[in-house]
Image (cartoon, rainbow, N blue to C red):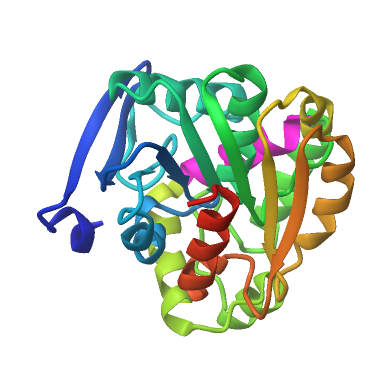
Amino acid sequence: MSDLSAAADFKEGYVPVVGGKIHYVAGGEGDQTIVLLHKLGGWAAEWRWVMKILATRMRTIAIDLTGHGGSKMNGEPPFITTQEEMASQLMAALNAMGEESVNIVGSSIGGCVGAVCSAFWPERINALITVGSALGGAADRGTLEADAATAIANGYFDENENPQPREHAYMEDAFGMRNPAHMEEQTLSRHAAGRWIQPSARGVGLFDYLAILPRIEAPVLVTYGTNGNYGRFSEPAIALMKNGRAEGIPDASAFPHQDKPEETATTIMTFLDL
């Protein structure tokens, strides 16, 4: 986040939590606070274009989740980093920053963590916006173990579960990505997360989001890039929510906050009535 944290109106810092410290970048002022959470294997910096826009309207905080980006955990990653653990660390960090109630916008795993926070701490989450998040049912541990072995066999991770660089063709096919610079950044952010990627992914796989969606009281906007493959999760998720709707961002990848930042920021601000 050097291009943001170096700016006079943005502050970079760390918050101690059980198990390590959480890295954040914050800026802007307003009556509302919005928290931006990155994708699996991502980092807070991927929100930098959207963050500059949102910070003109409200206090804006981009956070590195457990083991990602600048957030540092003590010890080795477990086989599974549960969604409950990641959500609790996030809420503890927000407590330490004096943020009593927030809006959450999360890409991929960030939206999943946001859904857990919204269900478990309803009084703390004013609104939730997911961006290309796989809000589905749970897999069993045996399936997760088999998937881990397959990922190593296919060369996506080495024998120690360090992520291997992805081919650009893979990223275009899997996520609808077309910008080589964003593809290269994904390689860098995945390297920074390292061995925390697979435990975090298994935490997503183990959690049953469909079981908690009816508990969410806050309004929810489920967004997705139309060039990505995550729109398929929107209809089943919305059907279970008390106050949710879906919206596709045209001609965007699974990560529209990177390749369509103005459109993404506008979608967020419109939903929050800003």
**What residue is rendered at 55% in x and 71% in y?**
166
Can residue 82 be seen by looking at this rendering?
Answer: no
Residue 93 appears at what percent x and percent y? 36, 24
User: The N terminus is located in which quarter?
Assistant: bottom left
Name the foreground residue: 85 vs 247. 247
Name the foreground residue: 198 vs 269. 269
Dominant secondary-structure state across the stretch colored magenta: helix
**What residue is rendered at 61% in x and 20% in y?**
122
The part of the chain drawn in magenta is 195-208
Residue 73 appears at what percent x and percent y? 35, 29
Residue lying at the far front in this picture: please name it.
Answer: 273
- Relative vertical location of residue 213 with respect to residue 188 in this rendering, above or below: above
Q: Is residue 96 left or right of residue 242?
A: left
**What residue is rendered at 38% in x and 64% in y?**
188
Residue 184 appears at what percent x and percent y? 42, 74
Q: Is residue 237 left or right of residue 174?
A: right
